[in-house]
Amino acid sequence: MELIPIMKTFRIFLCAAMAAAISSACTKEDVKAVPEEPAADSRVEMTFTASLEGGADTKTQLGAEADGKMPVLWQATDKLGVWDGTSLNEFSIPSSVTDFTGSVDFTGTAEDGQDMYYAVYPYSADYEFVMGTSNMEVTGAVIPTEQKAVKGSYDPSAAVSVAYSAEKEFAMRNVTTLVKIAISSSDIKSVTVTASDGQYLAGKSKLVIKEYPAVYAQSDRTDYVTLTSETAMEPGDYYIAMIPRTLEGLSVKYTKTDGSIATVSTKKTVELARASILPLNIDDSKLTFVAPEEPEPGTLELTIDFSAQPFTTDLPAGSSNAVTDEAKTYTFEYNEASYEFILYSKNGFFYNASDGYLRMNSSASGKGYIKLPAVADKKLISVIAYVVSDKTMYVSSTATNSGDISADQQMDETTKAKTFSLAETSVNKSYYLYAGAKNTSITKLVLTYTE
């Protein structure tokens, strides 16, 4: 008699449990992952009006000279990189624009209502914008070492300009200077301008956007710029864009289509001012061209330019104690071959990225040195060390001797080079370039090997 209530209770409990299980199962089947929707693009179509600095200042195309000045013109293919505080945006000139004098409209998409907008010409997807202490800084801009010859103008990829504005108007300011070359001969293929004091004129750079912008080459730096053409340049005026500097002299090398060359040099101070044109006033028709010197058979020349970071960014940077009691091995690639350098200093060595030199130290505790590579079937016959200042250096045959191959050499005041002509060296052997003084700073090495 008492079993009936118990069974009834059990059936009620069982049914409730089954219902809960069924409900739970149904819930699990119905739950599905909802994919996240991509963030909506909040950029809107915008138009910026951009104008250029006047007078002799330049951008992409020079107009005819008038009143002693070269007016500047936009081109239909010009593009601006516009930073809106969040993203880099590409802006171009609408096809409806036909007048490229004065101000020109650029259209694209960007975040509206920003406090400030920044522009860089020409556009590149490689630009990175970072707010510095007080001004916007842009990395990834390139002042090319080799530039395309354009008669009456210059390589548009080389003449960088920048601007900033809280409105929809950009007053573009040039970052570079221009050197004017007048070609009168009919067979000039290239012109190379080189800084006599080794200062860099081109490279991958950082731009500081302000009222008067600044540019600092950070990597791939060179102390020369070459204007080149696939065929002979037509007689006329050509322009080369460079990083503004004050140089203690420069040299200009002309190369003809047959390979013959002529070089003109000056030791006078040369001012390469931002947003200006420096005419060189050289008549190439009056130069004496000679065939280039052929290297001796079996000769190898290695140029290790520290301004171009030849060992990549692995070189320690910063304080003179960056590396202590440690040898660092680096590989230099040239013509599909590898050459090993070992850098050592008990007092530390480091790489100065802003000025492009390797510094070694020497004291009572030890001398800094570079173990120069051994080359198969060749011997080292010359070492040229370009330095920041005259410091004692010498070449040794071992890691302990002091100058048994060559004692210190006098520095050339113009080129700041110490040339060690080596005798009695051996094939397949490494030699050592030593620092004999504190703060020995090397900007470039040129090593010559022969059979």
Image (cartoon, helix red, strand yellow):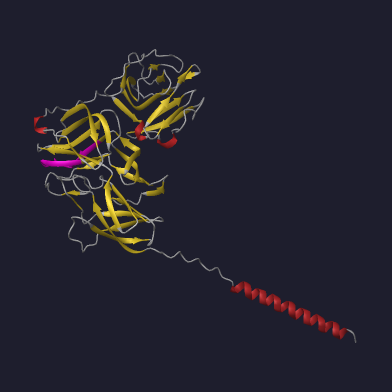
> Which quadrant would residue 233 be assigned to in this image?
top left
Q: Residue 406 in magenta?
A: no
- Is 17 on the left-hand or right-hand side of 427? right
Spot occupied by residue 200 in the image (x, y as percentages of width and height)? 30, 34
Residue nearest the observer in this picture, 153 or 253: 153
Which residue lies at the image location 34% right of the left edge and 46% below the top edge?
210
Residue nearest the observer in this picture, 351 or 18: 351
Q: Which residues are magenta?
A: 225-239
Query: Which residue appears farthest toward the right when viewing the image?
Result: 1
- Is 365 on the left-hand or right-hand side of 172? right
- Is 291 on the left-hand or right-hand side of 316? left
Q: Is residue 93 above or below residue 388?
A: below
Residue nearest the observer in this picture, 116 or 352: 116
Which residue lies at the image location 42% right of the left edge and 14% below the top edge?
402
Count numbered badges in the picture.
0
Q: Is residue 18 above or below residue 254?
A: below
Which residue lies at the image location 74% right of the left edge and 79% below the top edge?
16
> Which quadrant would residue 388 be assigned to in this image?
top left
Query: Which residue appears farthest toward the bottom when viewing the image?
Result: 1
Spot occupied by residue 85 in the image (x, y as percentages of width and height)? 40, 55
Residue nearest the observer in this picture, 128 or 408: 128
Which quadrant: the C terminus?
top left
Q: Is residue 194 above or below residue 76?
A: above
* Residue 450 visible in the current orientation: no
> Which quadrant would residue 416 be assigned to in this image?
top left
Q: Is residue 56 above or below residue 416?
A: below
Which quadrant: the N terminus?
bottom right
